[in-house]
Image (cartoon, rainbow, N blue to C red):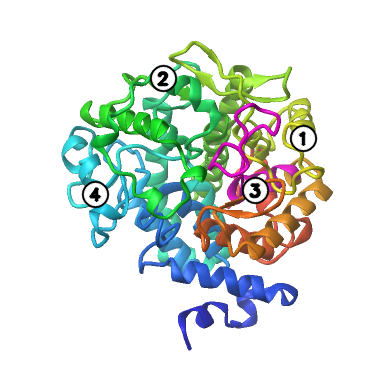
Amino acid sequence: MDRTAQLTARLPEREFAYDPPASASSLHAGAARVLEENWTGTSTVPSRSLYPHQWSWDSAFIAIGLRHLSPLRAQTELETLLAAQWGDGRVPHIVFNPSVPLDAYFPSPDFWRSSTAGRAVGAQRTVQTSGIVQPPVHALAAWLVHRADPGLSRARGFLARVYPRLAAWHRYLLHRRDLGGGGLVSVVHPWEQGMDNSPCWDAPLSRVTPAPARSFRRADLDHGAPEDRPTDLDYGRYVRLAADYRDGGYADGGGEFAVEDPAFNALLIASEQALARIAGELGAAGTARHARAERLTAALVERLWDPASGLFRCLDLRGGGHIPERSVSGLVPLLLPGLPRETAGALVRTLCGPHFGLGTSTELVPSYDLLGEAFDPHRYWRGPAWFNTSWLLERGLRAHGHRERADALRAAVLRLAQAGDFAEYVDPHTGEACGTTGFAWTAALALDLLHRGPGGDGAAGAGDTADMRDDGGDRG
């Protein structure tokens, strides 16, 4: 029996989390095939060709789907990533596979020079990584992975081992990255926020002198169409920011780019709530973490909410103001059940209104304002719909009682993921597959929605959304 067959085989009835719904077994098998093909033995690459290493928030989303196939493999995914954590608590956005040739991806390990340039802030000497971070989805992923098989998790001491690392990761963000002094976390590079070339970054990046084009070679254009990827000018600015951060010893606070982003902070809040759940499982009080999540939510609303446009805005700390662009990042805080009722209601109206068109002109959530001057349905984060943000917003709609809209979004994710061979992203109007195919988080999150079923019900996923509610209590 091959590995894909092993993962999709029916297990004993007590392992109900593994059984694919009979009506959609081909989607289950296809998603399992993608995750098996991208598995390296200790972690999962987003794409064998385009992204041949381990990425931070990719691995968190991948673990959420892997839990339905193998909770052990899902635990290993997160453990491998956290094993590369730096001494100051940061979880690097790439963990490099030493067996992959240097020219397969840029920036490569010899650009970041983590073991030397990052020595003062605790970079590991034996593992090569990048020096920047990505959104903190990891505690949420760890909690959901635990729920898939609590017996295995407890037997392996999974939560007891990852909790200190996750707590250190959050301390780093809250203490080292509050660059605006208002309680929220800042990103210091567009790659950190995960939505690399969003129009939200155009104004902050315009102040950055790009690195000379001859100083680097883009490996991404070997595998993706140039018209779908960031421009050379943007890439030059990304390289300049990363090189300056590296040359400053990866110390925080002095760079030209510092932005408070709503999605990044919303995911930190969701993961703080998850850490409270984990603490309760380990027999500790989670009250302080729930309280911190409430304070962060209040700061998010106070600093980034724009009632006039009905969504959250990015705050450019170096340029002195809110960025006017409407991005899916400004909708992601809908994930938080603790949002004020009127704020959540306004977000849903914006999501379904003319700027994002969910349920009318689009089936998945576009990454950028459909009416914006910079909208491009095929260029990376400047318009295409991504499966991870639609997954987050499906949870948000469900958490705030919009079950029919959540069900419709879930159905669209499943249909378009399968029709596009688990594409990296899609045209938000037509559903046409864009970027690479066989993309790991697309397969993983489709698998998660498949198992949770309409209405958020289903095997391992039942109650997942309820677990996100900040009810002020701790659960064992």
From the viewer's side, name the closer residue of 412 and 70. Answer: 412
Compared to residue 30, the image places residue 329 above or below, namely above
Q: In which quadrant of the rendered view does residue 100 lie?
A: bottom left
The amino acid on which the numbered mark 4 sits, given as a three-letter code, is Gln
Query: Magenta residues, as a range?
Result: 368-397
The amino acid on which the numbered mark 2 sits, given as a three-letter code, is Leu
Q: CA distance from mark 2 to mark 4?
A: 27 Å
Mark nearer the N terminus (1 vs 2)? 2
Can I make out residue 157 in this image? Answer: no
Total numbered labels: 4
Q: According to the image, label 1 marks what residue?
A: 348
Q: In the rendered structure, are the residues bearing label 1 and label 2 in contact, judged by CB atoms less than 8 Å apart?
A: no
Q: According to the image, label 4 marks what residue?
A: 128
Q: Mark 2 or mark 4, which is nearer to you?
A: 4
Q: Residues within 10 Å of mark 4 (few under 14, many from 20)?
A: many
Q: In which quadrant of the rendered view does residue 304 lie?
A: top right
